[in-house]
Image: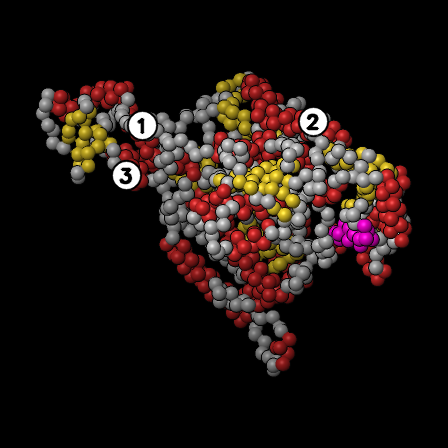
Amino acid sequence: MCVDYRGLNKITRKNRHPLPRIDELLDRFRGARYYSKLDLLSGYHQQRIFEPHTHKTAFRCRYGHFEFNVVPFGLTNAPASFSNMMLRVLDPVLDKWVVVYLDDLLIYSKTKKEHLQHLRSVLALLRKNGLYAKLSKCSFMQDETEFLGHTITKDGIKTSAGLSKAISDWPTPKSTKDVQQFLGLAQFYQQYVSGFAGIALPLSSLLANNTPFKWTDEQQSAFLQLKRAICSAPVLRIFDPDLSPLSKQMHPVSPSVQCCCRLTGKGIPIPSHSLPGKCSQLSGTTLSMSRNCWLSSMRSALGATTSMEPSSASTPTTPPSATSPTQPKLTRRQARWMELLQEYDFDFKYKRGVDNIVPDALSRRPDYREPDPVELYNLSVSLSPDVRDQLVQDYNDDPRLGPIYKDCLDGKVANGYSFQNNLLYFTRRGATTLAIPRHSPIRLTLLHDAHDSATAGHFGFQKTYDNLRRFVYWPHIAKDTQQYVATCEKCQRNKDSQDRPAGLLQPLPIPSQRWEVVTMDFIGPLPPTARNFDAITVFVDKLTKQAHFVPSTTSATAVDVAHQFFDNIFKLHGTPTSIISDRDTRFTSRFWQELHRLMDVKLALSTAYHPQTDGQTEVMNKTLKTMLRAFIDNKQSNWDQLLPSLEFAYNNAVNASTGYSPFFLNSGQHPRLPTALLGKPSSSVPTVDTFLTEQATTLALAQDALQRAQDHQEQQANKRRRDHKYKVGDKVLLRATNITIPADSIRPADKLRPQFLGPFTLLEQHSPVTFRVELPPFYKIHDVFHVDTFRPYLPSPESLGIRAPAPVDPTVIDGEEEYEVDEILKYRFYRRQHQFLVSFKGYGREADEWLPVSNLDNCMDLVTTFKEQHGIIF
């Protein structure tokens, strides 16, 4: 049983006691012939928890509430604490004839008699400390045993049969994660495989960042070779300095320091070692660099050979320059290395290069060699014969350059022109460029290369023109370049507009009566309150600016909003003649429209994605949010309780546009505050006629103030705007902001999606600044847009060629229009249907659409190919 202690572990002070290294444990078995293995029974549960802390391990289940008295599984410090306890218990005999890894103990001896004594001493220590082993998992007096994933024998160590079989039966990886899992297991046995890293390189290369998974024959070969190498791994000898001294053969040369270890006179190799990095990274002269490399290699080799202990005898062999004591003073780094080396029993000997075969081979691997000098060739680039012939033909056909070309052929020199290699050149301001006939097809190729190619970057007119005029000239080159860039399809769709927003501000008329025009909007989502509100519905009178704040929810339906209107507006102010709101689905519902039809209310929708027509509520929302920030508690959960007070405060404050408070414009008097009770009460009571006259005068003054504020707003706004020239029938591009099309599902980054969609046709003008646009039926958005979301669509003229494919007319089959599918982009299973995202021939990405497979009968070859490429089966 394991309890979820993630919360407790997060705040627990970590015990950094390290676990033993497995390779160091294996080195302890040299010379041993008999082994006994002990496995403690539920190891963690044999260690008690400090009694005052048991409540921290509490858990509950359907049987009640419990606390652990012993260490449970799942605590972050359990392994470190248990390992520390076992080291203390076995300290008298640890690493003498027993090693321990958590609850696994292995006792090793050279003779049977010794082994029995060692076994008794270990069991006595366990009994003394109240630790118990599980008999079914113990083995005694064995000459071969399994320990920590390795098989320990009297001859050395070898791979575990169980793990070797798991590697042998491992299926071919199908993903990057599968490769990670296989390499994680295989690297456990890398010490058994010579050249493991080289064999595994094709597999490990798949784990690099941003590398797509692609399983080729190279990966398959490396996968099989690695499995064979592990399953046929030899028995590794454990280094024993008592049997024979160690011989270290080194060659400290660039690009790395090579070291190979052998048992002197026996030819038994111990894994070779290579110091990463280059000798050039070690400062000094050539001679001192050689010595630095040698010292660095010795230091690293000692770290790689864990079996070698201080005072172990060894004989390093090396070139003479590395050991000659010619340097009178050592650097600090060299002194530290020499201090380390003095702890070992070394006998340095020089070995000739012809005899130092292994390290020389390691240091002279073919991939370490410097590349051969590059042979340089003289390469000249010139126009192809086809282009030359085309230019000559176009010269003769061109009405302007033709006569000049003929004169040059006859030896006559035209003003500003020159003749070379049968081609005409034009010289202007000291620059000579190739002359191109204006109607030559080569001109279009040059325009494409200077603007449309990846090396050109789709820059604007000036940069494109500068690139062209450096090398070529034709009459009206600037005009053609400007027109080519302006009608570029990709530039029109992907570049943001630099013009001022189109459409002058069109203020709504000032209402003549209170609560005649009401604006409505929502604020949310907000933090949930105790009453489960997470949104606010805001109602504002357009004349008096009086507001009502109603707590609501983000999931409120049209029926819920209707109840809010009846309970808070209709009962107090009656029926408005117009309601202004943003184009929300709640207001386009059938019930909402039917409700307003019965009340004789016209629902004036804001144009899609242009909230300026509902600017009053937008400003009110900002004001309300500011007030909430000032009074809300730290948990932000009491805002619904603040709404009545904030509504009173807002309605009692003088509005900057009207010059009066909303309360005063609605009731003709200011609300009574607690502070008003301290003053002298008024005894004058105006007559009804006087009161009504004053109210009418106040309302008229407020309307005049609103009109002045509106005129000022219109004047200031129109300074940053421009009038438009759109008319019904024009082709326009539509700004893509807040519009989601099916093609967006295959685009990972919104920032790189096109800025405009289209082209679309303007069908009807709704107001001076709004048009109804012909949209594809699957867009499912309001089709009336403000003109500042348009960009005029400029088709490419015939003189510049057809750069964008013309839309293909639909085919009429059984009375229905069908469009030709160009490509299948994506698959999904949606609403119990197999659907494909398809693009249509001759149309842009804005026309891409999700279609069920039943609608793709006429392009099943594309469907079948897509399914086979992506492994889709249904």
Q: Where residue 778 sits in the image (x, y, percent)?
A: 55, 32
Q: Which residue is mark 2?
A: 232
**Amino acid marked by disc 1:** Tyr
**Amino acid marked by disc 3:** Asp
Q: Is residue 702 magenta?
A: no
Most prominent secondary structure in the magenta stretch? Answer: helix
Q: Please identify, in this view, whether the residue under mark 1 or under mark 3 is nearer the observer.
A: 1
Circle number at residue 15 = none
Which residue does the image show at 13% across and 21% down from the upper left? 409
Which residue does the image show at 46% across and 38% down from the upper left? 754
**Amino acid marked by disc 2:** Ser
Q: Are marks 1 and 2 in contact (CB under 8 Å)?
A: no
Which residue does the image show at 42% across and 37% down from the upper left? 493
Q: Which residue is mark 3?
A: 466
**Can residue 407 be seen from the camera position used here?**
yes
Q: Please identify, in this view, whether the residue under mark 2 or under mark 3 is nearer the observer.
A: 2
Q: Which residue is mark 1?
A: 377
Q: Please identify, in this view, whether the residue under mark 1 or under mark 2 is nearer the observer.
A: 2
Residue 170 location, quadrant:
top right
Element under disc 2: loop
